[in-house]
Amino acid sequence: MKKFRKVLFGFVGAVSLGVMSSAALADYPNKPIQLVVPYGAGGDSDLTMRVWADAIEKVLDNPVAVINRAGGSGVVGTTYGANAKSDGYTLTNTGTGNIQVATNFSDTPYDFDSFTHIMSLVTYPMGLVVSSDSPYETFEDFVEAAKEKPVTIGSYGAAAGATILSDIIAKQMGYQPRYVHGDTTADSIASVLGGHIDAAVSFPPAFDSHVEAGKMRILAIAERMPHHPDDVPLFSDFGIEGDFGVWGGISAPSGVPQEVVDTLIQATEQVMEDPKVIEAYENIGAIVDFQHGDEWVADIRTTYDLMNEIAQEGKDN
């Protein structure tokens, strides 16, 4: 995963970051924009998208409403977004789980090319967390117990990005997890806090407040956030190989006009330099990682293709 970045941008063509092109804004947007978050309220995706929506509507001087359409590990809402009119007024929160994982490891009504992928906003480092009264004091304790009997791990769907990444960790460490899936990361965290399951794989926006309140502890994480203590272990400390983080961004139905893409990118460049926005993301545990353009799309397609190869190998075995 990329280190903590606060990406600074110069110019985009002849357009300064602080000045929106009047041509780009001439026709779009002129009515409310709907941003579909295919997960429940209160989870990491919901929180990070609301930061963007609140900031972007001020730059665009146009309403941007976040609509939660949870279900099927993100498939329900993503399908809705893929089938929307390609006019830029229905955007979809996309990322590792619903674009790269679900499309390869489950039967989805959409695929990578159902969308024009506009930009990535943030990345989230995955962590393994337990309640503060858990008998598993350390990651080693957890692994040792998991090798003797199946431990219950909360996630938000069999095809969720965190679940696939958790499977990779389990395979490398030699244990077999038993997943208990909720509709959202918040559901999994609540189940851990309630003592219903042993642990959860999730991301800082969902668990950091509980860790800070002394109700949970992080057994291991892909990458520490600035506010995490130095003694929080990394998965790499245990010889685990891989990039255990996910990206979260925004896409539109395939065929959306380039004017829409350009307008949203230009506006977001301005938003992502706002210190208040950067602070808001850091406060909810997200790493600012604003990317867009052909090179970025090629990178996420490469990951998509690699996951497709893994999925096909699984079917052949």
Image (cartoon, rainbow, N blue to C red):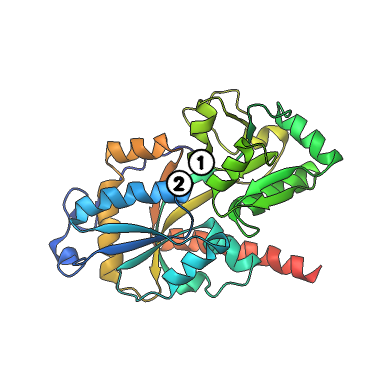
User: In the image, 102: left or right of 293?
Assistant: right
* Front one among 225 and 158: 158
Residue 37 coordinates in the image, percent (x, y): 43, 58
The structure residue drawn at horizontal position 53% and vertical position 72%, both measured from the top left corner, is 111
Which marked residue is nearer to the observer: mark 1 or mark 2?
Answer: 2
Dot 1 and dot 2 residues touching (CB under 8 Å): yes
The earlier-in-sequence mark between 1 and 2 is 2
* Front one among 1 and 278: 278
* Front one among 242 and 132: 132
Cα–Cα span, label 1 and label 2: 8 Å
The structure residue drawn at horizontal position 56% and vertical position 36%, both measured from the top left corner, is 223
The structure residue drawn at horizontal position 29% and vertical position 37%, both measured from the top left corner, is 276
Residue 301 coordinates in the image, percent (x, y): 53, 64
Quick check: 317 above or below 121?
below
Residue 104 coordinates in the image, percent (x, y): 62, 67
Mark linked to residue 42: 2
Quick check: 144 above or below 161?
above
User: In the image, 307: left or right of 248?
Assistant: right
> What residue type is disc 2 on?
Gly
The structure residue drawn at horizontal position 39% and vertical position 40%, both measured from the top left corner, is 281
Mark 1 secondary-structure assignment: helix
Rendered-image quadrant of the N terminus: top right
Mark linked to residue 206: 1
> What residue type is disc 1 on?
Ala
User: In the image, 266: left or right of 136?
Assistant: left
Q: Residues within 10 Å of mark 1 (few under 14, many from 20)?
A: many
